[in-house]
């Protein structure tokens, strides 16, 4: 146990092994609505996504919970690894706002974050991507982590549907109008139907489920049952399902999580579904989060919806040996022309 005298903060760890994670504390939203808690921090989500193999660092002052940070732990080829679990888009520390003046609040957040970081085990490779509301990366940087940025687009909940429509790029509006004349949007009847559609489209493209079919099925079942998500489909003539998306939400945002379409679907089928989801987010007064992008093509597609570009910080730290082995393997794979697997 360690005490930071200037803030009288005491921190302690909570193990989240397969057995103990079921006894995890109540969702971190109890820290207050302004804390950067997301659906991906929920114990039930992490239990499914990690098969129970997650842990929780905690910072307390007496009985007052000041901060928490969940993390996933697994082993790959003898390496101890912590990364984002399947379908878990962001994590990061969640710290209770104290209402101090700006300078003292910043100092408080740094101290709490540092206490969380000190509880992390010695991983060979650690990586997390933060929610766009989480800016507490300084303490990671000062402790040897590399801090970088990724990006997402978001639609503010403050506007109206008409204002959101006006912000769409002309090309995006046109494909949505065209798709709307030929397709009907409706909820997909069951998670099983969504999964069958998703897996069939992968099979026809000779691809496997990158998230794991079992994990995806359990998460889809869970968020539909808990009413923290929805599956929307675009139906063509004869009621044939041609495109589908999966949405999840929390008290702050609705996230565009999954999508799939048939090879012959209308080019605007997914755009129509996204536009429908944006409207539902606005009706719920939730931020609509496009859930990031990693290619120029996806960036151009998503920016057509008129969202605001938001930064998401990431932190990463590798042991010296892991870094050396990964570099050597990348060189070997690069010279052979084989696609490099990000796991190592």
Image: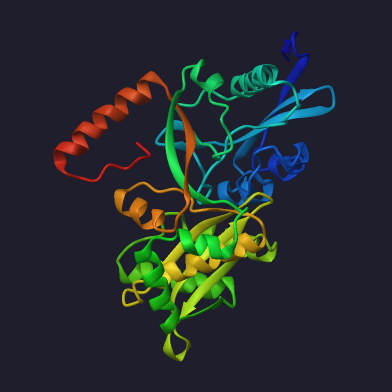
- Above or below, 64 relative to 211: above
> Which quadrant holds residue 92?
top right
Point out the residue furthest to the right here: 63
Kindly identify the residue that appears in the image at 47 percent across and 33 percent down: 314
- Above or below, 277 relative to 51: below
Where is the C terminus found, in terms of image quarters? Answer: top left
Q: Position of residue 129 (x, y in %)?
A: 50, 37
Q: Is residue 207 visible?
A: yes
Kindly identify the residue that appears in the image at 41 percent across and 21 percent down: 319
Number of labels in the image equals 0
Q: Position of residue 222 (x, y in %)?
A: 64, 61
Is residue 225 shown left or right of residue 126? right
Q: Which of 289 and 143 is in front in this view?
A: 289
Kindly identify the residue that appears in the image at 59 percent across and 78 percent down: 189
Q: Nearer the viewer, residue 230 or 46?
A: 230
> Which quadrant holds residue 282?
bottom right
Kindly identify the residue that appears in the image at 63 percent across and 54 percent down: 286
Q: Can residue 81 be seen in this view?
A: no
Q: Nearer the viewer, residue 17 or 231?
A: 231
Point out the residue furthest to the bottom here: 238
């Amino acid at each position: 146990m360690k005490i930071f005298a200037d803030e009288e903060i005491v921190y302690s760890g909570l193990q989240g092994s397969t057995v103990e994670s079921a006894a995890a504390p109540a969702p971190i939203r109890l820290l207050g609505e302004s804390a950067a808690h997301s659906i991906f921090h929920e114990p039930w989500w992490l239990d499914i996504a990690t098969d129970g193999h997650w842990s929780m660092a905690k910072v307390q002052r007496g009985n007052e919970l000041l901060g928490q940070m969940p993390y996933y732990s697994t082993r790959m080829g003898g390496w101890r690894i912590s990364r984002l679990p399947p379908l878990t888009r962001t994590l990061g520390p969640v710290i209770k706002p104290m209402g101090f003046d700006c300078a003292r609040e910043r100092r408080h957040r740094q101290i709490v974050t540092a206490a969380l970081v000190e509880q992390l085990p010695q991983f060979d490779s650690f990586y997390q991507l933060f929610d766009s509301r989480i800016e507490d990366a300084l303490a990671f940087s000062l402790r040897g982590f590399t801090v970088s940025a990724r990006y997402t687009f978001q639609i503010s909940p403050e506007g109206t549907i008409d204002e959101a429509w006006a912000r769409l790029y002309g090309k995006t509006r046109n494909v949505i109008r065209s798709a709307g004349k030929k397709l009907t949007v409706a909820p997909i009847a069951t998670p099983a139907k969504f999964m069958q559609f998703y897996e069939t489209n992968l099979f026809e493209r000779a691809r496997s489920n990158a998230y794991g079919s079992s994990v995806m099925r359990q998460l889809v079942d869970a968020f539909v049952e808990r009413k923290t998500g929805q599956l929307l489909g675009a139906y063509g003539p004869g009621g044939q399902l041609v495109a589908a998306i999966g949405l999840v939400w929390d008290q702050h945002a609705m996230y565009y999580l999954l999508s799939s379409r048939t090879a012959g679907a209308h080019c605007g089928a997914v755009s129509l579904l996204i536009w429908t989801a944006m409207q539902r987010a606005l009706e719920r007064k939730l931020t609509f989060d496009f859930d990031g992008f990693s290619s120029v093509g996806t960036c151009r597609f998503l920016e057509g919806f008129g969202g605001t570009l938001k930064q998401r910080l990431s932190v990463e730290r590798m042991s010296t040996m892991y870094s050396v082995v990964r570099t050597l393997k990348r060189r070997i794979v690069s010279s052979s022309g084989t696609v490099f697997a990000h796991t190592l």
